[in-house]
C-alpha cells in the first residue's frame, strides 16, 4: 500500500506530465496557427480594445484590427493568447479546439490517474488519522508541566477519541501494561491502522479485566425471571440461563416479586462472580 508521501509524489508527477502535455500541444497549435497566417495584432479575434475604464467588460470599447492583412476569419484565434480579465472577447479557444484526439485521450488518462491517486490519498490519510481501534505511538511530549506530558515512545491502543473543553482533539491510549495516557492527536502517529485480533488480544484482556472489576464493585445488571420465592431470598433465572438464589437484603426489588415475574435488577458483584456471570 502506497504511503501518503508516495501518493503525493505520484499526483505531482502526473500533474506535471499533464501540464507538459498541454504546453507541448499548445506550442504545436501555435506554430500551425502562425503557418496559417495568424494575425499577431489581434491574435485572430479580428478586433482590438480601443478604450477602457478598467472597471469591467461593460466599460470597454473595441475597434477593427489595424492589420490590413488580418486573417482572423481564416486562421482562427491564437491558441496561446492569454487575455486580461477585462478583455473578455479576446479569449483563447478551449483545449478541445486545438488539441488532437490523441492528445485529448492522453490528457483524460492522466486526469483519471490523478483522480484515482487523489482518492487513494484521501483514503490513506483517513486510515493514518489516529482514532479508536488503532495502535499509535506517542512521538511528541507536548507542552505544559513536565510531569503531566505524554511519554514519548509509548505505544498502545486508542480506546477513545474526544474533544476537551478547549476544542483540542485528544485520545485515551491504553498501553500493554494497562496504563492509560491522554495525548492530543497531534502528538501521536499511527503505527498499525488495522491491528489483527492477535495484536489486540493483550489490550482486550486488560479491558475485560477492568470491566469485570467494575462490575464486581458496582454489581452486574441483569434481566431475571422469578422461579421461586421465599421468606429471605428468591430463585431467579437470568437471560443467560443461569439460576441463582438472591437474598432480598441484597436486591430489594425481589422482596415483593411474584413467581413468573420478569424484572431488571443489579446482581451483587460477589454473587455474580461466584455464579460465573463475571469472568476475570
Image: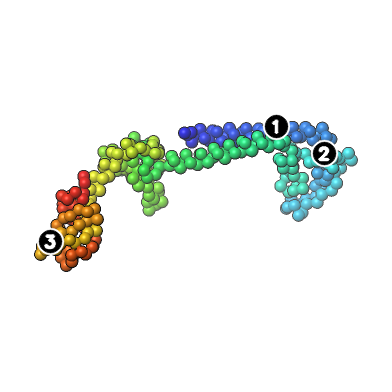
Which mark lies nearer to you, 3 or 2? 3
The local secondary structure at tag 3 comes to strand
Residue shown at 18% from the left, 65% from the top:
259
Residue 140 in sight: no
Q: Which mark is residue 24?
A: 1
- Report whether 41 appears left or right of 154: right
Does 243 appear above or below 9? below
**Dot placed on the residue nearer the N-terminal end, 1 or 3:** 1
Label 2 crowd bin: few (<14), some (14–19), many (20+), radius 10 Å: some
Work out how far the residue at label 3 is from the one at label 2, CA to CA, in angstroms. 104 Å
- Report whether 8 appears left or right of 260: right
Residue 57 in sight: yes
Label 3 crowd bin: few (<14), some (14–19), many (20+), radius 10 Å: some
Please give the residue where the numbered disc 2 appears in the rendered image.
75
Work out how far the residue at label 2 is from the one at label 1, CA to CA, in angstroms. 20 Å
Please state the horizontal and vertical placement of residue 171, each as a whole percent of the image: 36, 45
**Dot placed on the residue nearer the N-terminal end, 3 or 2:** 2
Please state the horizontal and vertical placement of residue 74, each as a whole percent of the image: 84, 40
- Residue furthest out toward the left: 231
The local secondary structure at tag 1 comes to helix
**Dot placed on the residue nearer the N-terminal end, 2 or 1:** 1
Please state the horizontal and vertical placement of residue 161, each as a whole percent of the image: 37, 47
The one nearer the camera, 208 or 236, is: 236
Does 20 appear above or below 92? above
Please state the horizontal and vertical placement of residue 115, each as a whole percent of the image: 57, 40
Residue shown at 63% from the left, 35% from the top:
18
Q: Which mark is residue 265?
A: none
Asked if the residue at tag 1 contacts the one at tag 2, i.e. Cβ–Cβ closer than 8 Å, the answer is: no
- Report whether 200 appears left or right of 43: left
Please give the residue where the numbered disc 3 appears in the rendered image.
233
Amino acid at each position: 500500500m502506497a504511503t501518503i508521501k508516495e501518493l503525493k509524489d505520484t499526483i505531482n508527477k502526473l500533474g506535471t506530465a499533464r501540464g507538459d502535455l498541454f504546453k507541448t500541444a499548445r506550442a504545436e497549435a501555435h506554430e500551425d496557427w502562425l503557418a496559417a497566417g495568424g494575425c499577431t495584432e489581434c491574435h485572430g479575434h479580428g478586433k482590438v480594445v480601443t478604450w477602457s475604464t478598467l472597471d469591467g467588460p461593460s466599460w470597454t470599447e473595441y475597434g477593427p484590427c489595424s492589420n490590413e492583412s488580418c486573417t482572423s476569419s481564416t486562421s482562427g484565434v491564437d491558441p496561446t493568447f492569454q487575455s486580461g480579465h477585462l478583455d473578455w472577447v479576446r479569449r483563447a479557444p478551449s483545449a478541445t479546439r486545438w488539441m488532437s484526439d490523441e492528445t485529448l485521450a492522453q490528457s483524460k488518462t492522466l486526469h483519471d490517474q490523478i483522480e484515482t491517486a487523489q482518492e487513494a490519498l484521501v483514503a490513506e490519510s483517513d486510515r493514518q488519522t489516529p482514532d479508536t481501534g488503532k495502535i499509535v505511538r506517542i512521538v511528541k511530549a507536548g507542552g505544559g508541566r513536565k510531569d503531566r506530558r505524554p511519554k514519548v515512545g509509548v505505544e498502545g491502543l486508542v480506546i477513545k477519541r474526544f474533544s476537551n473543553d478547549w476544542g483540542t482533539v485528544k485520545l485515551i491510549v491504553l498501553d500493554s501494561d494497562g496504563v492509560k495516557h491522554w495525548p492530543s492527536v497531534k502528538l501521536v502517529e499511527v503505527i498499525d491502522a488495522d491491528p489483527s485480533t492477535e495484536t489486540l488480544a493483550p489490550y482486550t484482556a486488560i479491558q475485560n479485566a477492568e470491566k469485570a472489576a467494575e462490575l464486581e464493585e458496582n454489581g452486574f445488571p441483569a434481566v431475571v425471571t422469578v422461579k421461586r420465592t421465599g421468606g429471605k431470598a428468591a430463585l431467579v433465572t437470568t437471560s443467560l440461563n443461569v439460576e441463582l438464589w438472591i437474598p432480598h437484603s441484597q436486591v430489594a426489588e425481589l422482596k415483593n416479586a411474584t413467581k413468573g415475574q420478569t424484572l431488571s435488577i443489579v446482581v451483587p458483584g460477589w454473587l455474580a462472580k461466584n455464579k460465573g456471570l463475571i469472568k476475570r
